[in-house]
Structures are given as structure tokens and as C-alpha cells.
Image (spheres, rainbow, N blue to C red):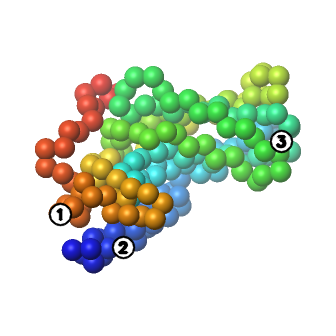
Amino acid sequence: MRSGMARILSRLNVVGVALVAAMALGACRDTGGEGKLFEVSGKIFIFNYRLARATYVVTLRPLRPMGEGQVAVASFQNPAGGAPFVVEQKIWPKLDKVSLESPALTCVVRNKPYAIAISIKGADGAVLQTIDTTLMSTEDQSILPDRPLVIDQLYTANPDLAGHPDGKLPGEPKPDCSKAG
């Protein structure tokens, strides 16, 4: 049984890498203009099958030298409804990109645009730039297993899924997506 699960995990990893690569190539890019500090250089939904979670990831590319003390604040639409997820990331002037990742999401739906609002703030807290964009998933979150397939950094198989190599558990409660926007 362990080899069957390993084969499934291997196939799913290949499919996952292919999906990530395809979405990264197709990611829309916002163009930089006069006075802009950053542009969106990539945006994608990450479906981590092993951990049974989905997240937004947005990457910003600086268009000119960054200042000390700047932060990027991203507001990600909550696919399940309710308040958006807000993430603040320090901007390191010597790095060539800024990556913003949301907390784990529920209720992601295929081909639905989700809003992302990003503010770049200076050391004094003043807003230097705003970026508004959207992101659509090519998959529904239903492709993920009900629980993580692994339980630690050593990728130990989750004992709760014994006999369920696809990660789907009969009778497992599903997230309430009735308030999804």
C-alpha cells in the first residue's frame, strides 16, 4: 500500500509542477509607468496537495531602487467570504523581488476573479504606490485532499488517511462556502 501511495504522490507532484508552470507562464503582468515603484511580475494560486492547502502568491519587481523601511501591504479577497486577508511584508532593498503570500484559503472556485490590493508604504507609513489586480484559478479547491497527506518535515504519511491514498475521507466535513463572494 505504501508504494501505491508513493506512486500517486509522485504523479500528483508532476501534475502540480506542470500546473504551477503553466499558471506562472500565463500570469498577467501589470506594467510599470512613470512614478511607479513596483510592478506585478507574477501572480498565482498555489495548490499544495501534500499539505491540503491553497494560497495566493504575488511577486513584485522593483522598477527603481527601493528605500529603507518600506513595506508592502497586500489585501487578498477571502474566497470563503468575510474580511479580506491582510499580509504585511518588509521590503529588503537589496533583493530583486518582493513575494507576498496569503494564509491558507478555503472555497477557491475555478475561473472566478479574486481581488488583490497592494499598498507600498514608506518608512513614515505614507502610501507611496497602490496596485490593484485580480487573480483567477484554473482549478477548484476540491482537487485538494480533505487532510494533509503528510504530517511533518520528513513527509511521514498521515495515519488518518490510511486506506485513502487520494486523501478524500467519506463523511469528512467540508468548508462552508455558502458566504463565498
Q: Quadrant of residue 83?
A: top left
Residue 162 at x, y = what percent? 21, 61
State which mark lies toward you, 3 or 2: 2
- The amino acid at mark 1 is Gly
Task: Tell me the tag on residue 66.
Answer: 3
Q: Nearer the viewer, residue 44 or 85?
A: 85
Q: Is residue 68 above or below residue 46?
A: above
- Which mark is in front, 1 or 2? 1
Q: Is residue 169 visible?
A: yes
* Secondary structure under the numbered disc 1 in the rendered image: loop
Q: Is the residue under label 1 in contact with that under label 3 (CB below 8 Å)?
A: no
How many residues crowd around disc 3 within 10 Å: few (fewer than 14), some, or many (20 or more)? some
Horizontal side of 18 relative to 148 (left or right) equals right
Q: Residue at x 25, y 54 (%)?
A: 160
The Cα–Cα distance between marks 1 and 2, rounded to whole angstroms, is 18 Å
Q: Is residue 49 above or below residue 117?
A: below
Q: Residues within 10 Å of mark 1 (few under 14, many from 20)?
A: few
Q: Residue at x 27, y 49 (%)?
A: 146
The location of residue 46, given as percent across then percent down, is 46, 52
Report the label total: 3
Label 2, on which residue? 10
In this picture, residue 85 sits left or right of residue 150: right
Residue that carries the numbered disc 1 in the rendered image: 163
Query: Marks 3 and 2, Cα distance to the nearest angstrom?
Result: 41 Å
Callout 2 amino acid: Ser
Judged from the image, the secondary structure of the residue bearing numbered disc 2 is: helix
Please give the name of the residue rendered at 39% of the width and 56% of the height, measured from the top-left corner.
Answer: 151
- From the viewer's perspective, tell me whether residue 136 is left or right of residue 69: left
* Quarter of the figure with the C terminus: top left
